[in-house]
Amino acid sequence: MNSHVPATNNVSVAAAVFRFSWLYILAAIAVMVIALALEAFFQLDLSKNSFFGVAPLMAAAMGTGNYYATRTGTKPSGAKAWLIALISFALSLAFNLAVILGFVFLTDSWQKLGLPSTFRLRGEEQWLVPLVLGVLFLFFVALTRLFLWTGANPVVKKQRKDATGVF
């Protein structure tokens, strides 16, 4: 049975971002379940493994790129691809912050952290923090864009091979 959907040459930014959003939430839940299972059954402490933070982003962006390529027959490119990556990463960042803040306030951890007013930047290097955060934000937007392309690439190659018989 061939599950190929004919190319429609039309995927809106909203549709791609919606696809990314639910894939991201599912991937984040799956990563959490896998991490808890590995810790419970094999006593592996994955709390310091940074890949588990990138895995949901990678899975969701690659799934969205695959969806885009299947629907359009092309890889996401240009301003549309960057816009999808920017909005998608911003939503994933907002989701992560909401989950973190939810856990902090639900577990009364905020009392141990102190009041937000105690987190003031002091010293001559305070300009460095927003700069580093901005660079990290741009890096992760670019990484999301790369994963979009990576997810679309095999679909486009397969479609090209099926159409021409040449790889």
Image: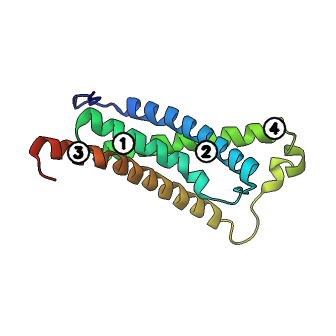
Picture quarter with the N terminus? top left
Question: Which residue in the structure is indicated by mark 1?
Answer: 65
- Could you tell which of marks 1 and 2 lies nearer the N-terminus? 2
Which of 55 and 83 lies nearest the eye of the viewer? 55
Binning the other alpha carbons within 10 Å of mark 3 as few (below 14), some (14 to 19) or many (20 upward) gives some
- Asked if residue 134 lies left or right of residue 153, the reply is right
Q: Which residue is mark 2?
A: 31
Label whose residue precedes the other's in the sequence (4 or 1):
1
- Residue placed under numbered mark 4 in the picture: 105
- Of circles 2 and 4, the one toward us is 2
10 Å crowding of disc 4: few (<14), some (14-19), many (20+): few
Instruction: Say above or below: 65 vs 19.
Output: below
- C-alpha gap between disc 2 and disc 4: 23 Å
Residue 47 coordinates in the image, percent (x, y): 71, 56
Which is nearer the N-term, disc 3 or disc 1?
Answer: 1
Q: Amino acid at mark 4?
A: Phe
Q: Are marks 3 and 1 in contact (CB under 8 Å)?
A: no
What element does badge 1 sit on? helix
Q: In the picture provided, is 84 more to the left or to the right than 57?
A: left
Instruction: Label 2, secondary structure: give it.
Output: helix
Marks 2/3: CA–CA distance: 29 Å
Colour setup of the view: rainbow
Residue under label 3, please give it. 158
As shown in the figure, which amino acid type bears the numbered disc 3?
Answer: Lys
Tell me if 116 is positioned left or right of 70 in this view. Answer: right
The x, y position of residue 114, in whole percent, is 87, 50
Residue drawn where x is 60% and y is 52% of the image:
53
